[in-house]
Amino acid sequence: MALLDLIFTIAGIGMLVAVVQTILKQAGKEDYGLWVVVAGSIAVFLLVVQRVAELIDRVRTTFYLW
């Protein structure tokens, strides 16, 4: 179930970023729109890195590594 939550979280961030970026683009603030996209990408990247770290930790404990 945690994987499904992660997928919905990433999709939600993507939709929010797309809407905000479109609004900023129409308002003539393309620079801010770019920063919104960068911030959204970093947020998603951090979520994925967290899950990969959990996966590595589980593999270590499963196979008694370290």
Image: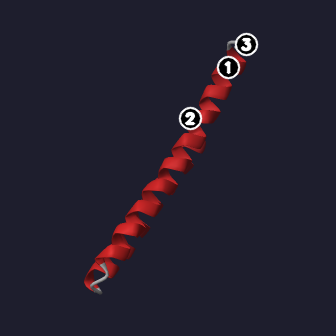
Place of residue 17 in the rendered image (x, y in percent of width and height, measured from the top left): 40, 67
Dot 3 corresponds to which residue?
Answer: 64
What distance separates the C-alpha of mark 3 from that of mark 2?
18 Å
Left or right position of 12 against 62: left
Question: Is residue 1 among the parts visible in the rendering?
Answer: no
- Nearest the eye: 4 or 42: 42
Dot 2 corresponds to which residue?
Answer: 52
What distance separates the C-alpha of mark 3 from that of mark 1?
6 Å
Left or right position of 60 against 12: right
Q: Quadrant of residue 26?
A: bottom left
Label annotation for residue 60: 1
Residue shown at 48%/48% (left/top)? 45
What distance separates the C-alpha of mark 2 from that of mark 1?
12 Å
- Packing grade of label 2 (10 A; few <14, some 14-19, many >=20) is few
Residue type highlighted by circle 3: Tyr
Q: Pointers 2 and 1 in contact (CB under 8 A)?
A: no
Residue shown at 67%/26% (left/top)? 58
Place of residue 8 in the rendered image (x, y in percent of width and height, measured from the top left): 49, 54
Q: Is residue 57 above or below residue 29?
A: above
Question: Is residue 48 among the parts visible in the rendering?
Answer: yes
Place of residue 63 in the rendered image (x, y in percent of width and height, measured from the top left): 68, 12
Quick one: SS at disc 3? Answer: loop
